Image (spheres, grey):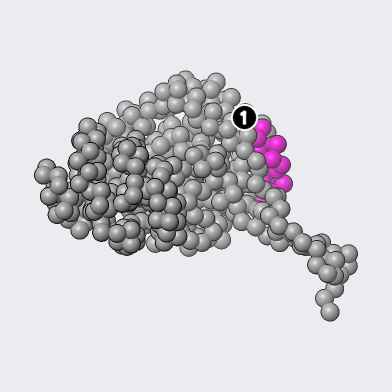
Amino acid sequence: MTSVDGQDLREYCREMAKSAKMAAAELALVGGAQKDNWLRHSAALLRERIDTIQAANEKDIAAAPDFGLTDAQIDRLRLTDDRVQGIAAAMEEIAMLRDPVGEVIESSVRPNGLEVSKVRVPLGVVFFVYESRPNVTADAAAICVKSGNAVILRGGKEAAHSSRAIVDILAEAAQANGIPTDAVQLVGTTDREAVGHFLALDEYIDVAIPRGGEGLIRRVAAEAKMPVIKHFAGNCHVYVDRRVDLDMAERLTINAKCQRMGVCNACESLLVHKDVASDFLPRIAKSLAENGVEIRGDAATCHILGDARLATEEDYYAEFLGPVISVNIVDSLEEAIYRIEKYGSHHTDAIVTTDLAAARQFTKCVDSSAVMVNASTRFNDGGEFGLGAEIGISTDRFHARGPCGLKELTSYKYIAYGDGLVRT
């Protein structure tokens, strides 16, 4: 990794951002077929260079214990043959998606003959800050370039060698396919101050996207001079209504909580209507226990479940990202909605019900990036929503909300054609 210090670090970041801005301008002239050729060529090279990628990955694996990574984190870091094949396949899938750049969103002809079109355009330069997942390096590069954006990748030091090997391959394919090589750049220093320097360069960088722990995301949101696409946490709720199929409620709750616990769209809080609590809680407690999940509940929950732990106020706000779930019995749908608003993170919340009126009220009143009816919270995902790929999930209300795919990495501009028209 490059070692820079003091003023040199600031200049290093500025030059990289400046190069990305120039590359973004060049990308405006690159057609969709050319970008797709780059994606497919990159996928082919990734498969051909599995040995090279894995040799780099072994350096990261060897250093992982020194960074304090757990066995589970080291496993996620490891690039097996199947995982490299998966990275290549993902790039090929992105190549198959429709290019959003240049799409005419709407158009009209004014009475004076002026033809006005609203056309989709790239955001420009993306500064993407993420933690130690080498597959994210390729995914982010692919989705940014496909949507016409240059990207500066600032990955975690834990995957530094793996990410460098992947980016070098993408650069080789870019050069062979007429894509500006500076459209994908990997920050070559692990110095944390570099992030702050990039976040100040709003004259070159158009948007910052952090993906990782809440601390990282809050730092980016606090320091960035450019817009930030983000979500802080994923305290996702499942509400089991008074009119409900209990088998469905059990199945969805277990999937939402246990299918993958350490992700932002996993269920962390369970709300149960008082009319079904005595029937539902014992059976869901048994299923949760079978998955090693601890219940922290209110007094009423602990009364029904003698071995549940009494929840604290902090537990209701918590994103556990592990085998713990908070449980609260509510008197009404309205109370459930109130608790979701108070304790939730506006990420993903679900209702399980056979009452259509209750479902409609829930979807109208719950202000989250995705609201599920009789479906697991785990479906709030770009692939599952048919976007094909995503760079992250946003809980913001402006520009992009929910899974951010190709279209969410674009804006629009108006293009008007006349025949010498002048305004009178």
* Classed neighbour count for the residue bearing mark 1: other residues with Cα under 10 Å, few (<14), some (14–19), many (≥20): many
In this orientation, which residue lies closer to the viewer: 253 or 257?
Answer: 253
Q: Position of residue 16 (x, y in %)?
A: 54, 49
Amino acid at circle 1: Arg
Q: Name the residue furthest bottom.
A: 424
Residue 130 visible = no
| Bounds of the magenta segment | 25-37
Asked which secondary structure carries label 1, the reply is helix
So how many labels did they put on this image?
A: 1
Residue 227 visible = yes
Decide: is 417 above or below 44.
below
In this orientation, which residue lies closer to the viewer: 356 or 42?
Answer: 356
For the stretch drawn in magenta, the main secondary structure is helix
28 in the magenta segment: yes
Residue at 29%, 59% in the rendered image: 332
Relative placement, left or right, of 7 versus 420 is left
Q: Position of residue 369 (x, y in %)?
A: 45, 54
Q: Please state, as top left, top right, bottom left or bottom right, where the C terminus lies in the image.
A: bottom right
Q: Position of residue 194 (x, y in %)?
A: 42, 51
Relative placement, left or right, of 422 versus 384 is right
Decide: is 107 above or below 191.
below
Decide: is 210 above or below 261.
below
353 in the magenta segment: no
Residue at 33%, 62% in the rendered image: 334
Residue at 16%, 53% in the rendered image: 300
Relative placement, left or right, of 121 versus 230 is right
Decide: is 207 above or below 1.
below
The residue carrying mark 1 is: 40
Residue at 50%, 24% in the rendered image: 85
Q: Please state, as top left, top right, bottom left or bottom right, where the N terminus lies in the image.
A: top left
Q: Position of residue 82 (x, y in %)?
A: 45, 22
In this orientation, which residue lies closer to the viewer: 36 or 231?
Answer: 231
